[in-house]
C-alpha cells in the first residue's frame, strides 16, 4: 500500500508541469502576449498588435498623437509598437494636451480644439453699415476662421482623422476688403460676387491660397491622408490611413 501511494504521488508531480505548459498565451494577459502582440499597461493590462491601426475617431474633445491610434476596446489612444512610458507623446491637435490618466489628448478648458461650422461667434459691436446695401448674414465678420483673434467670431481652424473644420466669414462685395491677415476668396458655385475671408495660412481647404481660383491646396484631398493640417500656408500630413506610408517630407502618403 505504501508503494502504491508513492507511485501515485510521483504521477501527480509529473503531471503538474505538463498541465502548466498547456496554458495558452492570451492577447489579454500582458505577461503571456501571443506572437505578434506586445504588452501595454498604461491604464489596464492588455496586449496590442504590432503595427496595429484603427479607422475609429476619438470622442469629441479628445484626439490622438500621430504615434498612436484610437482603440474602441481600450477606450484610449494606444501605440502601434512598444514605446517608452517615461516621455509623454506630443499632441498634434491645437489646444490639446496629453493626459496620462486617460491616455489621450484632451482639449484645454476654453480651447477644446474642436471648432465647428455651427458654433456661435462671440457677441460684438455691430460695425457701421457701409453704403451700397446690407451685408449677407448681418455682422460681416461673424463665423470667420482665423487664429489671430483680432476680429469677433474668429476661431481656430483644426484638423482630425481626415476631417476638417473652420468657420468662415461670408461677406458681400459691397463691403470693404477683408480684415488684415485674411484673404478674400470667391465662393465657388455662386454668381452673386460673394466671397469669404479666409486665413490661408491655416485653412485646410485653401492652404496657401484661395482654392476657388486655383491657388493653394486642399489638404483634405491628399490621397491616403488620415490626419492633416495647414501650417503657415503649407499642407502637412501627420498620419496616413492603413495601407499607406507617411512620406519623409510629411506632405503625402505613399501606398505600401
Image (spheres, rainbow, N blue to C red):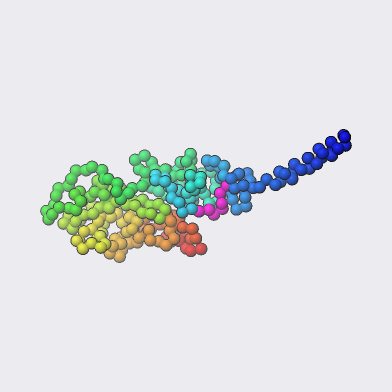
Which segment did they paint magenta? 47-53
Q: Is residue 30 left or right of residue 216?
A: right
Q: Quadrant of residue 1?
A: top right
Question: Residue drawn 19% across and 61% down?
Answer: 192
Q: Is residue 39 visible?
A: no
Q: Is residue 4 left or right of residue 155?
A: right
Instruction: Point out the residue furthest to the front here.
Output: 1
Instruction: Point out the residue furthest to the left here.
Output: 131
Question: Residue drawn 48% across and 50% down?
Answer: 69
Residue toward you, 191 or 4: 4
* Count of numbered circles on the image: 0
Q: Position of residue 115 (x, y in %)?
A: 33, 48
Residue toward you, 87 or 158: 158
Instruction: Point out the residue furthest to the top here.
Output: 2
Residue 250, placed above or below residue 1: below
Residue 36, placed above or below residue 12: below
Question: Within the magenta stretch, is there residue 61?
Answer: no
Question: Residue drawn 21% across and 63% down?
Answer: 191
Question: Residue drawn 88% across and 37% down?
Answer: 3
Instruction: Point out the residue furthest to the bottom here.
Output: 214
Q: Is residue 18 left or right of residue 254?
A: right
Q: Quadrant of residue 214?
A: bottom left
Residue toward you, 22 or 35: 22
Q: Position of residue 110 (x, y in %)?
A: 34, 40
Q: Is residue 121 visible?
A: yes
Q: Is residue 252 left or right of residue 208?
A: right
Q: Position of residue 154 (x, y in %)?
A: 28, 48
Q: Position of residue 49 (x, y in %)?
A: 56, 51
Amino acid at each position: 500500500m505504501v508503494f502504491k501511494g508513492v507511485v501515485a504521488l510521483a504521477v501527480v508531480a509529473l503531471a503538474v508541469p505538463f498541465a502548466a505548459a498547456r496554458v495558452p498565451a492570451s492577447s489579454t494577459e500582458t505577461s503571456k502576449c501571443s506572437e505578434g502582440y506586445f504588452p501595454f499597461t498604461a491604464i489596464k493590462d492588455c496586449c496590442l498588435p504590432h503595427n496595429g491601426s484603427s479607422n475609429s475617431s476619438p470622442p469629441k474633445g479628445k484626439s490622438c498623437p500621430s504615434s498612436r491610434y484610437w482603440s474602441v476596446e481600450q477606450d484610449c489612444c494606444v501605440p502601434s509598437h512598444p514605446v517608452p512610458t517615461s516621455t509623454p507623446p506630443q499632441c498634434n491637435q491645437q489646444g490639446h494636451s496629453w493626459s496620462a490618466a486617460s491616455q489621450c489628448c484632451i482639449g484645454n478648458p476654453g480651447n477644446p480644439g474642436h471648432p465647428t461650422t455651427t458654433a456661435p461667434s462671440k457677441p460684438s459691436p455691430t460695425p457701421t453699415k457701409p453704403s451700397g446695401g446690407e451685408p449677407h448674414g448681418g455682422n460681416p465678420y461673424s463665423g470667420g476662421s482665423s487664429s489671430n483673434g483680432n476680429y469677433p467670431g474668429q476661431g481656430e481652424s483644426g484638423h482630425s482623422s481626415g476631417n476638417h473644420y473652420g468657420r468662415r466669414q461670408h461677406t458681400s462685395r459691397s463691403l470693404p476688403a477683408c480684415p488684415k491677415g485674411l484673404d478674400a476668396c470667391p465662393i465657388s458655385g455662386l454668381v452673386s460676387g460673394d466671397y469669404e475671408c479666409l486665413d490661408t495660412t491655416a485653412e485646410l481647404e485653401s492652404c496657401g491660397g484661395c482654392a476657388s481660383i486655383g491657388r493653394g491646396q486642399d489638404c483634405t484631398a491628399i490621397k491616403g491622408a488620415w490626419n492633416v493640417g495647414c501650417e503657415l500656408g503649407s499642407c502637412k500630413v501627420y498620419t496616413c490611413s492603413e495601407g499607406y506610408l507617411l512620406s519623409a517630407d510629411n506632405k503625402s502618403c505613399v501606398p505600401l
